[in-house]
Amino acid sequence: MFASFLLALAPSPAPPQDDGALAFIGAKLIPVDGPEIENGVLVVRGGVIAHVGPLDVTPIPLDAEVRDVQGFVILPGLVDTHSHVGGPAGGDSSSPIQPEVRVLDAVNPRSAGIQKAQAGGLTTINVMPGSGHLCSGQTVYLKLRDADTIEGLAIPDDDGNPTGGLKMANGTNSRRDPPFPGTRAKSAALVRAKLIAAQEYRDKIARAGDDASKLPPRDLALETLVEVLDGKRIVHHHTHRHDDILTVLRLKEEFGFRVVLHHVSDAWKVADEIAAADAPCSIIVVDSPGGKLEARDITFENGAALERAGARCAFHTDDGITDSRHFLRSAALAVRAGMSRKMALEGLTLAGAEMLDLADRVGSLEVGKDADFILLDGDPLSVYTKVIETWVEGKRVFDRRDPQDRLWAVGGYGAGHDGAYACCAAEEANR
Amino acid sequence: MRILVALTLCAAAANAQDLAVKGGVVHTMAGAPLRDAVVLIQDGKIEAVGPAADVAIPEGVRVLEAAVVTPGLIDAHTVVGLAGWLNYRHDQEQLETSEAIQPELRAIDAYNPREPLVEYLRGYGVTTIHTGHAPGAVISGQTLIAKTRGDTVAESVIVPVAMVASTFGDAARKEGGSPGTRSKAVAVLRAELVRAQEYVAKREREAEAEEEEEDDDGGPPARDLRLEALGRVLSKEIPLLVTAHRANDILTAMRVAKEFDVRLVLDGASEAYLVAEQIREAGIPVIVHPTMARARGERENLSMETAATLRAAGIPVALQSGYESYVPKTRVVLFEAAIAAAHGLSFDEALSLITIDAARLLGIDGRVGSLVPGKDADLALYDGDPLEYTSHCVGVVIDGEIVSEEVR
């Protein structure tokens, strides 16, 4: 209904370099949505996947440029459900609930973080504002194309509007001095009051029908929350402690919004409740527990616990908390602690795509999906494996053999600078 | 005589530290890895190491088995035990900000051997840590070396005063206070080192005079614990551990160290690869930043290949878990070495950064760091390549005692 009020971004079709097809033959394919294929073919045309399957039964178009990639492993492009790449700040200190704030207005598309994320094999990311608010603003889903503008990175919906969710948080991060809440109960009370206001706002608009004179004045914050209530915008909810997790589930039940639980440090304590509420989890894997009281009991075992309970589980970097270049490691450490290989690999790809409502376009090697994939020189769960190439919509955006790209991948002089400066410095360093 | 024998047997049983560890592969870090080998342990020390065929395991001795056995891992620089996992005021003892220079702060007065992060690190095979006062002040205090066992400082610590910790660069500057700039920070450090030189010289003169009974000015100067601590650095008894990341700060640290003729150990050293030649020439060892440290601020140019680059240049190198102000509250050197192994080092080289090379750098290689007879029986057991994400640490032995059999 309010789609027309949103900034209409020019859709960013990712045209292929030309209309020709590109066939990758001989690699081990891990399609994620089906069994691994030892000796496979992946054909890309027009920015999408045209064919995928075993070498002996999959057609290779006559006009296709063929690349022999024997010895490599091909995995769908990685989906990071929670990143702060581009360094965006969302809401300010004026109030605890700021749904009208859009992080897309603040992302630096020239951030070195985007290059590093490509080097890590990430192709789709959810860039979030922080967790210091009950609601710090709208998130934005990005494709890590080679682009210098936010429009060039955004993922437009059918109407050309940028897609994204809404960042919310509970627990201790959003407990601050007034006007912020001082307790957990007050946090939930403020959120309930705002969502009820959004319900009333929505009802008023419905009652007005075609009579424009009866429409309430536009409220950009409530408009966004109406999208949440209507299930059009997913809530990405920062939460750590078991009781805070259950508070989110209680609010979800009361208001019927769609939610992805993020971090979920205590997931192992309430995995059954999470599964029963059908709430997917986007978890982080950090090297040690703690850092703050509510993350005291975080463990590598969360992925396994959620899998056992039957809850959907994806991983995230929370970049800069963890570095996008080490994202594959999250799944590997979850496997170390008992998660299945299959679900761990889905947690890097398809599960995350589902949590961003993008599973029809990304997350697996499936005919018709965007040609987002990575070439690895070994098993995705091995520390010795490197991302060699990253492809987004049929275009290569990272090539480890390229000295500039290699600098992003391993670091070195100039790898930390943003945008144009970095290019100059990198050239210097590589000379 | 019979009584004596009985007593001796009793004592041996009470120690209960006789143990044999069998490994499919044993990385002794003193020569090539051994296949199907045994490490025999007696009274907390390594008694024998060799192929299973050559080392007889006495009857009744408990035997642990694992696919891979390594020396207990050494974390060459951390703040764990001073910094706690909860990150609240009551468990953060690593930095005292009231003054810029406080070398008199002793790590043993702050180390908490029951800190859960100590046990956490141990679960992955870390048996020795060099810990203490953190980066963040021109001189933040002393460091110590401890085993990751024991309920008291006395039971844990093996070197009570290991180094004096110093910081060059942004972290040593005080916003809105003094020292507020890099050059001021170095100026106050130089001034304090000069004072310490004079203090040491005066005390020596007074001591000599006293011996020759020529003391006529009322005895030596009043004791100054701060200057005494710096005096131990000036006499090269203990090294100055300087955390510096930018190339220019690294060179500044080397300039000051040369001027005062102190033993320097570089820490962090994100841009060390830019000045590797100077570091090698000066013979300075480097405890490289965690390979997965956040590439931000002064560390923006860090490289995952730095350990390999410096090692190839002939510089003594060790790895560390480092200091984190937020999460993760500690890193694990096992994981950091894994990234180093994936970035230019062989498995053995990467493992040496957290075993024998770390021991040498810390000056404790007479006791730990490799599996050779006579050394402390500190071992880590794994069910596969220890550096692989999907392998597990399945046992940890410190001083011959099994301290963990958890699968981690």
Image (cartoon, coloured by chain):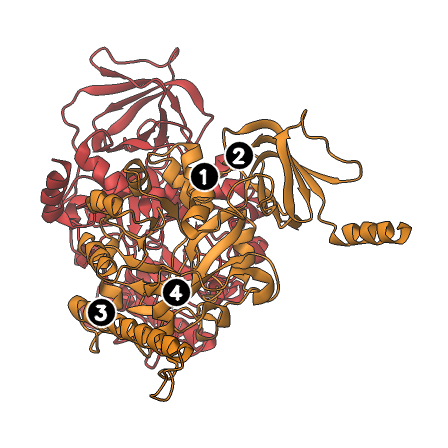
Chain colours: A red, B orange
Asked if disc 4 and disc 1 are in contact, CB closer than 8 Å, the reply is no
Q: Position of residue A260 (x, y in %)?
A: 42, 54
Residue drawn at x 30%, y 59% as measured from the top left: B262
Q: Name the residue under label 3.
A: B190
The residue drawn where x is 48% and y is 53% is A279
Residue nearest the observer in this picture, B116 or B146: B146
**Amino acid at dot 3:** Arg
Task: Let me know if marks 3 and 2 both belong to one chain.
Answer: yes
Q: Where is residue B75 in the image (x, y as percent from the top left)?
A: 45, 51
Q: Distance between the residues labelled 3 and 2?
A: 44 Å
Query: Dots 2 and 1: beta carbons under 8 Å?
Result: yes
Q: In this view, does B303 lie above or below B145?
A: above
> How many angstroms separate mark 4 from mark 2 (CA)?
47 Å
- The kind of secondary structure element at disc 4 is strand
In the rendered structure, the residue with mark 3 lies on which chain? Answer: B
Residue corresponding to mark 2: B27
Label 2 amino acid? Answer: His
Q: Which dot marks residue B351?
A: 1
Specify the subunit that label 2 lies on: B
Binning the other alpha carbons within 10 Å of mark 4 as few (below 14), some (14 to 19) or many (20 upward) gives many
- Check disc 3 and report its element: helix, strand or loop: helix
Q: Where is residue A158 in the image (x, y as percent from the top left)?
A: 23, 44
